Structure formats: C-alpha cells, structure tokens
Amino acid sequence: MRVLDRIRSNSTGRLALKIGIGALGGLVVAVGIVLIPFPGPGWAIVILGLAILAVEFHWARGLLAFTKRHVQNWTHWVGRQTLGVRALIGLVGMIFISFVVWLSVLLSFDLNLFTWSLDFVGWR
C-alpha cells in the first residue's frame, strides 16, 4: 500500500493531507507568481506548486495541464520568431522588469533609483 493511500484511509489523515498539500502548494505557487516578472524560474516554480496541489486536488490537475500547455505554446511561438522579434520581446520584458524593480524600491524604501543613478554618475 502506498504511503498516501495509507494516509487517506482515515478521515483525519485525509483532512491533514489536504490541508498540508494545500498550504505547501499554495505557498509555492504564490512565491512563483511573485517571481514571474523577474529573470529566473518564476513559471517553473508556479508549475511546481501546481504539481504539488495536483497530488490532492482535481482542479489543480486541470489548471496544471492548462498552464503547461500555454507556457509551452508561448515558448515554441517565441522560438519560431525572427531574431528581431525575439530581441523586441526581450527588450519589452527587460523594460517591464526594470519598471517592477524601480516601483518596488520606490514603494519599499522611498528611493527613486532613476534620480539616484543620475546623481551617482554626476549627470544631475
């Protein structure tokens, strides 16, 4: 008998497993969503969180399949584009990430990175 089947065999174990999987999967998905705009594995972390949730929740299995399909479609579409289009997508992504970082620092530390940078290099 598998470990999860043994846990699910009584109502207390079933409830504890749902709560534990829900909390862990939800936390991983939330961290992944926060990391999506930044360079790195944001989408991979979201998919990992959905995979954790899919262990116990049927709706998460469907959402996981939907997400994987659309991320793969986007990746394949970008790969088929010309170098110029890919460069433009990269530039738009970099501008978006820069805006998110600028806004985060401004709201968190009340520091305008743009004016601070100009002051730092002596252009202002």
Image (spheres, rainbow, N blue to C red):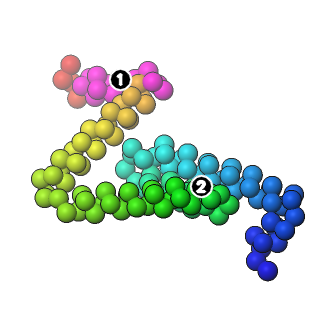
Pick the front one: 42 or 57: 57
> Is residue 20 found left or right of 31 in the rendered image?
right
Counting from the top left corner in percent of width and height, residue 28 is at 58, 52
Residue at 38% x, 57% y is: 70
The location of residue 71, given as percent across then percent down, is: 38, 57
**Which of the 4 quarters of the picture holds residue 48?**
bottom right
The three-letter code of the residue at mark 2 reads Trp
Q: Secondary structure at mark 1?
A: loop
Amino acid, disc 1 = Asn
Identify the magenta region. 107-119
Residue located beneath label 1 in the image: 112
Q: CA distance from mark 1 to mark 2?
A: 42 Å
Q: Which of the two discs, 1 and 2, labels the residue nearer the N terminus? A: 2
Q: Label 2: which residue?
A: 59
Residue 1 against residue 95 in the figure, above or below:
below
The location of residue 29, given as percent across then percent down, is: 55, 50
In the displayed structure, 42 sits above or below 2; it is above
In the picture, the disc for residue 96 is none
| Residue 33 counted in the magenta span | no
Figure label count: 2
